[in-house]
Amino acid sequence: MDETKFNKMLYAIAVGLYEKERCDKYVYSNHLMYGLNMLSALAVQNHQLQMLAELHESAFLEKYATRPVKEWFLGWDEVFFEKVSCFPLFQTDALITLDDGYSFHITEECSDLYKDAEDDLFKALEQRIVYHKMKELSEADYTAVRRFIIEHPVCTDKELRKFKRIHPTKEIQDVIDMAYEAIPQESYLCPQCGWTMRFHGNQAKCCNFSCTAKHPVPEQLTLLDTFENKRLKHGVMRYICLPGKLELEIKQKAEKYGCKTILWPEKDRYDIQIMLPDGSIWAVDAKMYRNPYALANAIKADEAFETVAANKRFYVVPTKREFPDYCDICNDVLKDKLVQCITDHELYQMLRKVKVNE
């Protein structure tokens, strides 16, 4: 199996798991079956009859999707294992966690794979539709709409009406209408990301796996009024709002240290332009990938950022990452040494030094 087929198999499985996790009732997923069929063919080719017997959906969820991908292939032929171990997505961690019933929750890594796959498999996803509509706006309107979305994962109808009055054009109002949806009954305000948290039995679910890591319970949370409030659609929350929180934090910190900033310059060619007191320009692209190998794969193909006119260019990731060599893995694939992958803490240290040396 070559890397393209291996990636396609994982993308299809991740998309299928994403589809099933979002549905409260049982749903058949063509994408999951397609990915499992590819994995079954691989098992046949490598004489892994035991795995083949376990690749029906329920057994796969329990025995494989809950484990890192590299563990799926333990005991396989050494030549095959050595070949696939060189693929970046081979380092993908578990795709789901199981709750105490029959439902499951996708991990951030699974969500990252889903995002990467959507360009090829889903041209009409909610996030893609909203994003493309935003890109049709003027630069000032784009910035206003995107900032409102980031700052309002849940908002009242009154807040939505006020924003529409300030920005009365039909194009902006269409984007806002597409970005938000009604809140399901029995939804709580997530204390970490500000979106909605729901419960299936004792299992909390939000748009981000880390929001449920401390096992919250309904009694600790604020029950939302589903009549007065709206929430961002899942894809908009996961891929526009959540990364945007880091973008706004970087902007705030840079200005604290005496720099000027522009959000999403050149209609979101990158995330933040930082203008230092000496006139030099830093370009920042904030990234939220949990798996450094998945991010490395993405930035390896990102030719646009390397051509941005700036004195320094940074991919910035949150400091809290499980991989201690996260940035090193990403920097290894960067051809232009004027581009670096660093943590937000490292960026703030650099900005602090600039302030001190004024």
Image (spheres, rainbow, N blue to C red):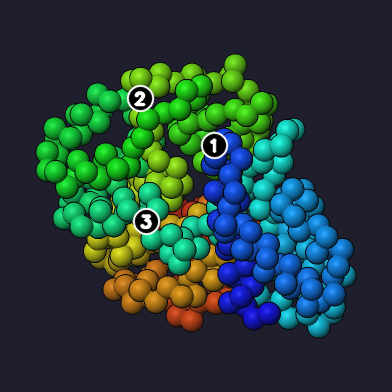
The amino acid type found where label 2 is placed reads: Asn
Q: Quadrant of the N terminus?
A: bottom right
Above or below 223: residue 293: below
Q: CA distance from mark 2 to mark 3?
A: 26 Å
Q: Which residue is mark 2?
A: 229
User: Looking at the image, do the residues carrying marks 3 and 1 touch, with CB atoms under 8 Å apart?
Assistant: no
Q: CA distance from mark 3 to mark 1?
A: 23 Å
Quarter residue 41 falls in: bottom right
How many residues crowd around disc 3 within 10 Å: few (fewer than 14), some, or many (20 or more)? Answer: few
What is the total number of numbered labels drawn onto the structure image? 3
Q: Which residue is mark 3?
A: 124
- Looking at the rendered image, the disc whose residue lies closer to the viewer, 3 or 1, is 3
Q: Position of residue 250 (x, y in %)?
A: 40, 50
| Residue 19 appears in view | yes
Q: Which residue is mark 1?
A: 206
Decide if residue 149 is on the left or right side of residue 197.
Answer: left
Write the residue at 49% across / 25% down.
Answer: 187
SS class of the residue under badge 2? strand
The amino acid type found where label 1 is placed reads: Cys
The amino acid type found where label 3 is placed reads: Ala
Write the residue at 20% across / 34% down.
Answer: 163
Q: Position of residue 131 (x, y in %)?
A: 32, 54
Q: Position of residue 129 (x, y in %)?
A: 32, 53
